Image: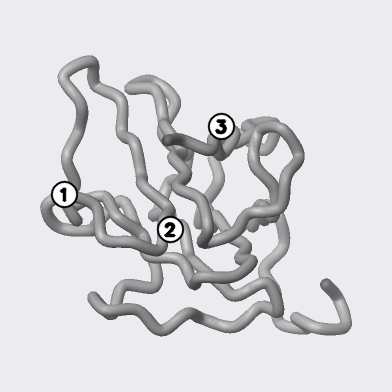
Amino acid sequence: MAYSQIYINPATEAVYPVCETDHLGRSLTGAHNYSITFAPDDLPPAEHFWSLTMYHRRGLLCDNVIGRHAITDRTPGLEVNDDGTLALLLQHARPSSAANWLPCPPGEFRVMLRLYGPRDLSWSPPAIVRVG
């Protein structure tokens, strides 16, 4: 991190969890559909804002049909489930509702969750689960 991202913020200002595997340790790939679900009382604990950004496995942003590279706590129109959970869909094909969709490339990918002004440095994001 120090070499490739020399101007990165200290953990007291921002944390950047990166994920390249699903809940069973399999590489994330656009050949499958995934979900990351935040409980109503367990959204990313960020004082300022949080974002989940999609990257190719090699670390570049991914072109996609809706031009969305990240979902944030400020993304308009996010749909919360009846039980209060927030499920974000990570998949290549457009789902029936694109409100919570973060498009991924057809090949391997990674996601980075950014928390600016983290309130709890011991917090861990939920696992990404392969669905369907």
Q: Is residue 22 left or right of residue 31?
A: right
Badge nearest the viewer, 3 or 2: 3
Q: Which residue is mark 2?
A: 51
Estimate the spatial distance between the alpha carbons at disc 3 and disc 2, rounded to whole Å. 14 Å
Q: Of callouts 1 and 2, which one flags the residue occurring earlier in the amino acid sequence?
A: 2
Q: Of callouts 1 and 3, which one flags the residue occurring earlier in the amino acid sequence?
A: 1
- Whether residue 15 is visible to the viewer of this picture, yes or no, is no
Q: Out of 87 and 121, give the one closest to the viewer.
A: 87
- Whether residue 100 is visible to the viewer of this picture, yes or no, is yes
* SS at badge 1: loop
Residue lying at the far top of the rendered structure: 83
What residue lies at 51% left-to-right and 61% top-to-bottom? 30
Quarter holding the N terminus is bottom right
Q: Out of 5 and 109, give the one closest to the viewer.
A: 109
Residue lying at the far right of the rendered structure: 3
User: Image height check: is 110 above or below 45?
Assistant: below
Image quadrant of residue 112? bottom right
Q: Which residue is mark 1?
A: 96
Badge nearest the viewer, 1 or 2: 1
Q: Is residue 3 left or right of residue 24?
A: right
What residue lies at 66% left-to-right and 52% top-to-bottom? 19
Q: Three-letter amino acid code at disc 2?
A: Ser
What residue lies at 41% left-to-right and 56% top-to-bottom? 91
Label drawn at residue 33: none
Q: Which residue is mark 3?
A: 126
Q: Out of 98 and 13, give the one closest to the viewer.
A: 98
Q: Three-letter amino acid code at disc 1?
A: Ser
Crowd class of label 2 (few under 14; some 14 to 19; many from 20; radius 10 Å): many
User: Image height check: is 27 above or below 54?
Assistant: above
